[in-house]
Image (spheres, grey):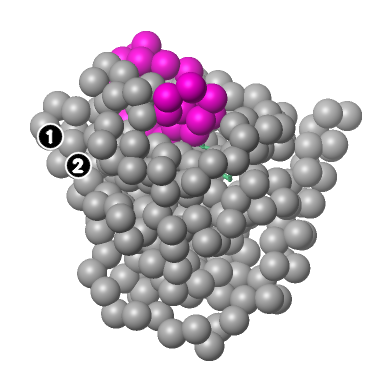
Amino acid sequence: MEVTKVTAMLDLIVESTRRRVKEIDSSVPVEERQIQSLEKSIRTRKQNGVNPVIAEIKFRSPSEGLIRSYEDPAGIASGYVDAGCAGISVLTNPEFFGGDNSFIEKIRPQTAVPVLRKDFVVDEAQVRETAALGADAVLLIAAVLGEELGGFIEYTHGFGLEALVEVHDEAEMENAISGGARIIGINNRNLKTMKTELETTRRLGPLAAGRGVTVVCESGITGPADIREMRKCCDGFLVGTYLMKAEDPAKALEGLVCA
Ligand SMILES: O=P(O)(O)OC[C@@H](O)[C@@H](O)c1c[nH]c2ccccc12
């Protein structure tokens, strides 16, 4: 029963996203620019013995409801940068995650780290829009794109952007690697049950070892101990709720970066 209900939730998100896609203005020019590489940022930090953490800006979610009352995303982002994040993940879905495209435009000019645009990409117009907004990378979810994943990865790279390709099981991991993914996010949250299990990264991380990809452990990180425990199975981390629930998100992040 529960599974059917939550699958309907993902369908709902994808459906509402398709409505937003119709409103994208594809005549907005995409300016030529040098992107900041998330892949490089993660690798450099790892080599320097610092935990690479992509810190997320997310005010609400279907599983948590309201996570933090709204405040200027640019202020949170600059705290994250000072605390040594490897990148900033920005939710732009308004209906379910309290995000907005304008968050990217607000954050980008004052941010010296890669910015990841997090949304439910179902159409190439959203990838083009991501480039126009000035982000450096875009999330592509294997479970949403299925057989089209490889084509979307190629399209993304064609814009000079990087893709964080999200997987949740063995088949999606293979689809991502054969589709040309360079950065793979293992989502510990089961999108059907909404539960998080770090076990997912423990199981799937080793499948990517030695295959030239950068692996990010996503969702359900609840503090420095999780980072210390999981870092042998991945290259970096993506953390949202734990930081956004903290009174001082930047201070909470410092504890993860130095864990
Ligand atoms: O808040 P958490 O449990 O730290 O998780 C962050 C991030 O992984 C999560 O926001 C996320 C992972 N994949 C997504 C896809 C869409 C929206 C959100 C997400």
Is 210 above or below relative to 231?
A: below
Q: Is residue 25 visible?
A: yes
Determine the secondary structure under disc 1. helix
Q: Nearer the viewer, residue 44 or 240?
A: 240
Range drawn in magenta: 222-249
In the image, farthest residue toward the left: 48
In the image, farthest residue toward the top: 225
Q: Nearer the viewer, residue 248 or 89?
A: 248
Residue at 19%, 28% in the rendered image: 50
Figure quarter occupied by ligand 1: top right
Q: Is residue 27 left or right of residue 236?
A: right
Q: Mark 2 points at which residue?
A: 43
Instruction: Name the image quarter holding the C terminus.
Output: top left
Residue 226 among magenta residues: yes
Is 98 above or below relative to 62?
A: below
Q: Name the residue under label 1.
A: 47
Label 2 with label 1: CB-CB less than 8 Å:
yes
Residue 64 placement: quadrant = top right
Residue 87 placement: quadrant = top left
The amino acid beneath tag 2 is Arg
